[in-house]
Image: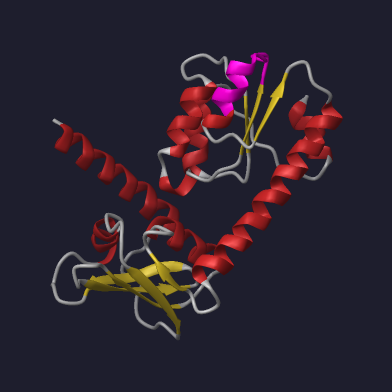
Amino acid sequence: MVATVLEKRGYTVITAVDGEDALARALVDPPDLLITDVMMPRMDGWALVKALRSRPELATLPVIFLTALSSDEDRIRGFRMGADDYVPKPFRFEELDLRVAKTMRRTAALAQETRETILGPSLKGDLSQIGLSALLTMIDMERKTGVLTLRDPGGASAQVLVRGGRVVHARLDHAPDPVDADCIYHLLGWAAGTFELIACDVEGADRVQTSTMNLLLEGARRLDESTQVEAV
């Protein structure tokens, strides 16, 4: 019923049967907004949002909880997890429609404000304010072409060539390895430093040959594995 109402308003709605299904779908094709129940089999709504927030590419995904859990404690827990709105059941579809529209407008305005504040017109900034994962996602969305230069506080630097938003080549300036996709996985670990994108023509073969999304997913998986090994 929710999907039908929102589709009539012009939204494209993808449904999932439970939390695990939703997480898998979101990782493959990140949505603009998540509407989720809390009480679900296999993975409940709390666990789903926590898992999404742990992924750099989904950390700022807008979330609306739609649930029968209506106590003040549950609402507070939802907002502490970063929910944009919390709608208790029973609810009116007109109200949900208005809340979805409000959340989408607020998210779009915040994204534009963040881009203008952090990136500026010349696409220069600080990696401690916007991580490489979010930066590459923005470059992909805007189909930028040029050379992205990264510098960490220790003096290391790297060049990432992007064409039409996609990474086609990447290398460190003073080391032969890693290169291309492996270089991006390495650079995703840089939590501080600076970046600058210079728009220019980028020629040559696509040596990475995968989408930005696939690069970030594989990079997040490798970072997770590295963290688990260090914890052991």
User: Is 75 inside the magenta-drawn segment?
Assistant: yes
Residue drawn where x is 82% and y is 31% of the image = 95
In front: 56, or 86? 86
Quadrant assignment, res 121? bottom right
Indicate the colouring scheme. Answer: secondary structure
Region in magenta: 67-78
Total marks shown come to 0
Question: Can see residue 130?
Answer: yes
- Image coords of residue 174 (percent x, y): 15, 76
Quadrant location of the N terminus? top right
How far across and how far down the image is residue 44, in percent?
51, 19
Is-magenta flag for residue 23?
no
Q: Of 34 and 12, which appears nearest the observer?
A: 34
- Residue 167 picture location, percent across and down: 39, 67
Q: Is residue 223 above or below residue 232?
A: below
Q: Tell me if residue 69 comes above or below residue 195 in the rendering.
A: above
Question: In this rendering, does residue 20 appear at all?
Answer: no
> Which residue is located at x 67 percent, y 15 percent?
70
Q: Which residue lies at the image location 55% right of the left edge and 67% below the top edge?
A: 117
Q: Position of residue 154 (x, y in %)?
A: 19, 68
Quadrant where the C terminus lies?
top left
Q: Nearer the viewer, residue 75 or 64?
A: 75
